[in-house]
Image (cartoon, coloured by chain):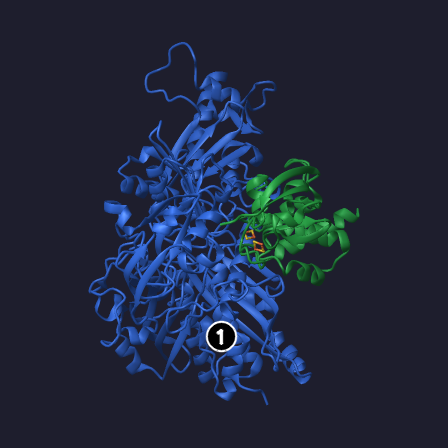
Amino acid sequence: MHTETHAITVTVNGTPYRRSVEARTLLSDFLRHDLLLAGTHIGCEHGVCGACTVIFDGLAVRSCLMFAAQADGHSIVTVEGLAADRHHLHPLQQAMRDCHGLQCGYCTPGILMTMKAFLDETPAPDEARIREALSGNLCRCTGYQHIVDAVKLAADRMRG
Amino acid sequence: MVTRNFGAPIRRNEDSRLLSGQALFVDDVELPGMLYAAFLRSNVAHAVIRSIDVSAARARGGVVAVYTAADLGDYWAPGPLLVPPPPIPGITFNQRTQVPLAKHKVRHVGEPLVVVLAQSRYLAEDALADIAVELDPLPAVTDLEQALSDASARVHDDVHGNVAARVRQSRGSYAAARAAADHVISRRFRYDHGASSPIETRGIVASWDARADQLTVWDTTQAPVFLRNGLAAMLGLSERQVRAIAPFVGGGFGPKIMLFYPEEVVVPWAAKKLNRPVKWIEDRLEHFFATTQERGQTHDAEIALTRDGRILGIRDVFLHDTGAYNPYGLTVPINSQCTLLGPYVVPSYDSTFTAVFTNKPIVTPYRGAGRQHGVFVVERLIDIAAHDLKLDRAEIRRRNFIPPDAFPYNNEIIYQDFAPLSYDSGNYGPILDKALEMIGYEHFLKEEQPHLRAQGHHVGVGLACYVEGTGIGPYEGAKVQVQANGKVSVATGIGTQGQGHFTSFAQIVADQLGVDVRDIDVVTGDTDQFYWGAGTFASRGAVVAGNAVNEAAKVVRRKILKLAAEHFECAEDDLEIAEGAVSVVGVPGQAIKLGALALKANPMRGAVRPGTEPGLESTQYFGPPGGATASGAHAMIVEVDPQTFMVKLRKYVIVHDCGTVINPLILSGQIHGGVAQGIGNAFYEQLVFDEDGQLLNASLADYLLPTALEVPHMEVAHTETPSPLNPLGIKGAGEAGAIPVGPAFAQAVEDALGLPDRGIELNEIPLSPNRLFELAGKLR
Ligand code: FES
Ligand code: FES
């Protein structure tokens, strides 16, 4: 099979990467397996579960629905870029821990990225807005209640 | 011992790793030279295999190997029977377990035929298109009643009538109860339970180290020890040559306890044969066929009562769909049979089920594991009785509860753990009362509902009670060890899929050893860290492994005190352990850190007394004499849109009794998650198969999981009846949330639409808006 490749430059969590990728390589696979940023998870590869969500030029997008080649020249933040390290968590991460907003933690990176983009736009959301913003991310473990609590708490803390 | 951690809502140790994207899941394992497996799966449900031609696939660039059943040679064998049938007299059981790659016949859509190993997953999947398979389709067996007829095709040629099993259990004389009854109700109930759908699908990575003669397997399993033992046996290795690791696992809910999945048989074999690491990660489409699921049962049930609503007896005859194979034995239908009895005194019971082979994916336990089906039947029968006898729905339940002084209460039938179904302890009245109070039952019925109805709102209340057998044997073990740096390590053989074991086990140890929870490092699911164990199933992790952890920590505590007493030349009673050190009470400065004591326990020079064990460590095992029975009640208020039949949950309350509570935060998370799955089950999760055995909704866009908009805010409360069967008094809580949602939902929707007075009953689950529209018809 003829496999076309593209040379791309993409900035992930502030670091520029130059790579050659096959045209068909999904952005999710590129992040996970080429750049070894495995914090971005894969739940469905058809755009429903939201586990693969990353922030792409400031917007939350599903990395399983994009090709790596489309990221050429763009800037991406993944869960690994949310905080400096695991001992200095982002307020959203800290609130998730404080409220027990995760169980298996598999959906969590996608939820953090979706909520990060949401809170950037909506710093003072009520519960209904949070639930709506969260409704594109599936979590099979928590029943969402503690995630909603965490987002509320994070919003309060981030507003200071 | 000052209890500070046990019972406290402590934040989880494992979270910072998970939150920062640093937790290792199976698909995160990257090894040099790794190959990627892809499976060609049957696209028909039932067929004879004529031929398979893999030559073109083998010739494709990047493909390293392609194997069919024939290539497996003597390695090809049906999988093990995980749970043999319980010792019930007169039982019929036909064992037919799944095979690694289909040989003569395919028996369900998605059954694997060929494996391709290639340099990338993309190339492996490309090569699947090169394979030519000729299948002669046979009629698919999909309907349970038709499957039993002589005219039906047979899933297994030698199993007449597709009967996988037939089991009858009874107590007392139902015939006598019926004859004595004032009122008898018989109905047909259908209960469908769907796919567990963890957000992480299944996967396995296997790596053979030829220099060390050692196989390492990372697997999304709930039972790493069984996986290791089975792989060793299959591959002709000793157990010590196989290391099975269940790293972070992205949700399990039951189907990840099942083994051996075909991929778990084929991938390690290929890794060894090719001497290269092999990875296989299930995609979401495969998950709908290749991972086990639960499905429907049809019950013909009858209840005999006195005029004042006391149950005299229940008879139930039901069919259970077990799919194409039955590797998990009878666990699911036995759970349905046993859990039907609920928290009620049922003096006579006569229950017979037939498990039926069909050309559909395999059925094994999914959270609740058949308990939902039984609870639905008994709760609905009681609701119908309440309506017929003009009794309040709560009152009729109360009248039939097993009284608190009747425990241990023996139901005189055999449970899934082969022991008699006996409830260890419970107190059901206060649970129901509390749930009624929290939902505002009286107020709702007397004031709110009439008021809202007058405004045109179709609102109703539903409630359901249940018991859940949890924490069954055989046993688990744990090793607790004080490290030289003062931290404590805890290792146990169970796997963990989000239940918070890294924290709850640490809480148990923290109290025994006076160490901060954050300084306790729990390892689960690595057979090189802990050798023995059974697995995480039947809501047993906290109960069985938790008690083993406690026992081991107690021994370590004794060792610490003994050694410190020698060190300080004082009596053990003069010592206290706190903040990671042992000190002599009332003598400032007389203290030694646990890490330093651990070093002393492992001297490098000098003589030690014979019989001395080095280190501050202990390995202990715990096996409960029987399962601990948790219980609870759920209540909800719903509003139904009379145009669209969309149901909105306006209020949801749960009262749960799972004995003593290790961590209320983790517990409420377990309950919330269970209820969310119960809501999906009650409302719209259904695997829709057509008559050819094709699944029509195999994607998350079509098989709908509840989102944050469908799952309401829940209020959880607890009552506490400790289990007498284990020193910590714990009962399991993993499945409870999911169990009673269906009947409470059906009852609430009936109430909202005033259906009982119109002679309409909702005797099936799920109740999607479409189905409700069909059943309830247009409202006037
Ligand atoms: S993996 Fe991308 S949305 Fe599910
Ligand atoms: S925490 Fe497991 S899927 Fe969300």
Instruction: Find the residue positioned furthest to the front.
Output: A2
B158 or B726, which is in the foreground? B158
The residue nearer to you, when weighing B259 against B435, is B259
Judge left or right: residue B265 versus residue B452: left
Residue B158, compared with residue B60, is above or below; it is below
* Residue A118, quarter of the rendered image: bottom right
- Residue at 57%, 40% (x, y): give it: A34
The hue of chain B in the figure is blue
| Image x and y of residue B717, in percent | 57, 58
Image position, residue B68 (x, y; %)? 31, 51
Frontmost residue, B342 versus B281: B281
Q: Colour of chain A?
A: green
Q: Residues within 10 Å of mark 1 (few under 14, many from 20)?
A: few
Q: Is residue B726 visible?
A: no
Q: Label 1 is placed on what type of residue?
A: Glu
The chain carrying label 1 is B
Position of the C terminus of chain B by quadrant: bottom right
How many numbered discs, if any? 1
**Quarter assignment of residue B230:** top left
Q: Quadrant of residue B590?
A: top right
Residue B607 in percent (x, y) is at: 37, 11
* Residue corresponding to mark 1: B395
Label 1 element class: helix
Vertical arrangement, residue B692 with respect to residue A2, above or below? below
Q: Is residue A44 left or right of residue B612?
A: right
Q: Position of residue B442 (x, y in %)?
A: 59, 75
Q: Which residue: 22% across, 76% down?
A: B150
Q: Front-most of A110 and A145?
A: A110
